[in-house]
Amino acid sequence: MIAPFADRLMRRVRKLGPLCVGLDPDIAEFSPLFQNGDMRPGEVPTAAAVGAFCLAVLKCLEGRVAAVKIQSACFERHGAPGVTAMHSVLEEARQRNLLVILDVKRGDVGPSAAAYASAYLDSDAPLRADAITVNPWCGLDTLEPFIAAAERSGAGIFALLKTSNPGADALQDRPVEGRPLYEHLARALAPLAERLHGAESGWSGLGAVVAATQPQAARRLRELLPRSLFLTPGYGAQGASAADALAGFARGPGGPPGSGLEGGLVNSSRQILYTPETRITGNLRNWQKAIVAGARSAAGELARAGKQLAAAG
């Protein structure tokens, strides 16, 4: 039987660090190397270009990062050919021993939620990922099919908890009984996290999406969810520093001494995939070097920040 997601992820994080590279293929930012036809969204050649771009990125990341996060919307906008391309990227990531978080943000009720879980999390799922993002704001009953599927297959889920979009505070920070609403949701998630506990790592595969741009909230959420893995977007191009991104991380229960902090993944996309060099170069080797350099730089920055924060106590 496959090991729980939390254990599989933390083996890699403790070796390679918490960097997760987001595969958000933006055809407007592609180098000439990946241009195919007139690049109109929804066309078969465009979907093929999206797939080729992501496969080339995966080749650069193999053995360098713990995981990748695939943004399904960037593929779905190209219709059936785009979904086919996404399937190829999922398979290639698996072949390259990269754990995959599929960013689908699903949240529905009853049979619909069960169908989504079957599509992404079951061991025979057609679009199988190691973990997916889910939206719990329709109620905790909407999470049950996803948690049950994750229990069966050893997968993980990351529930949207504290996001960075401008309108989020109006709902997520709304005071209820003296506390922001997102804290009430975190308290409700805490007992469920035990169901996806990884005995080897000490962490839970029922994680939370907590924006790097919300470091104060992240620290509070770590108190409420002491063993849940965090998926932290917003580092880099969205303005959050490495220290901000690691604000919700903690000393790990099983990491080597002096290794800094752990507790999830820090996602970065644009500062790695779309630099001035990667946008304009027509030389594949130079493009590959730029991708590797971007990933190495981000990983190094996170490692230094983690050790500094750990030393500061």
Image (cartoon, rainbow, N blue to C red):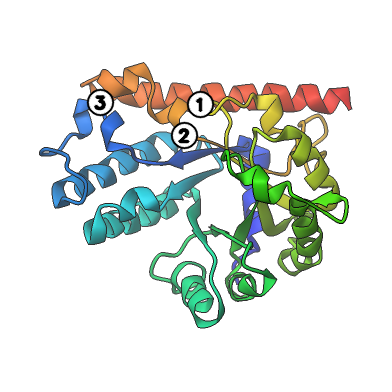
Q: Earlier in the sequence, mark 1 or mark 3?
A: 1
Q: Quadrant of residue 36?
A: top left
Element type where label 2 sits in the image: loop
Kind of residue at badge 1: Ala
Residue 119 on image: x %, y %: 44, 71
Q: Earlier in the sequence, mark 1 or mark 2?
A: 1
Q: Are marks 1 and 2 in contact (CB under 8 Å)?
A: yes
Q: Earlier in the sequence, mark 2 or mark 3?
A: 2
Kind of residue at badge 2: Ser
Element type where label 3 sits in the image: helix
* Circle 3 residues within 10 Å: few <14, some 14–19, many ≥20: some
Mark nearer the viewer, 1 or 2: 1
Q: Residue at x 74, y 69 (%)?
A: 195
**In this rendering, is residue 29 above or below 225?**
above
Residue 288 on image: x %, y %: 34, 26
- The residue to which callout 2 is attached is 269
Quadrant assignment for the N terminus: bottom right
Q: Is residue 249 visible?
A: no
* Circle 2 residues within 10 Å: few <14, some 14–19, many ≥20: many
Name the side, left or right, on which 219 lies relative to 26.
right
Name the side, left or right, on which 3 lies relative to 81.
right
Residue 32 on image: x %, y %: 19, 27
Mark nearer the viewer, 1 or 3: 1
Nearer to us in this view, 209 or 55: 209
Name the side, left or right, on which 273 lies relative to 136.
left
Kind of residue at badge 3: Leu
- The residue to which callout 1 is attached is 237
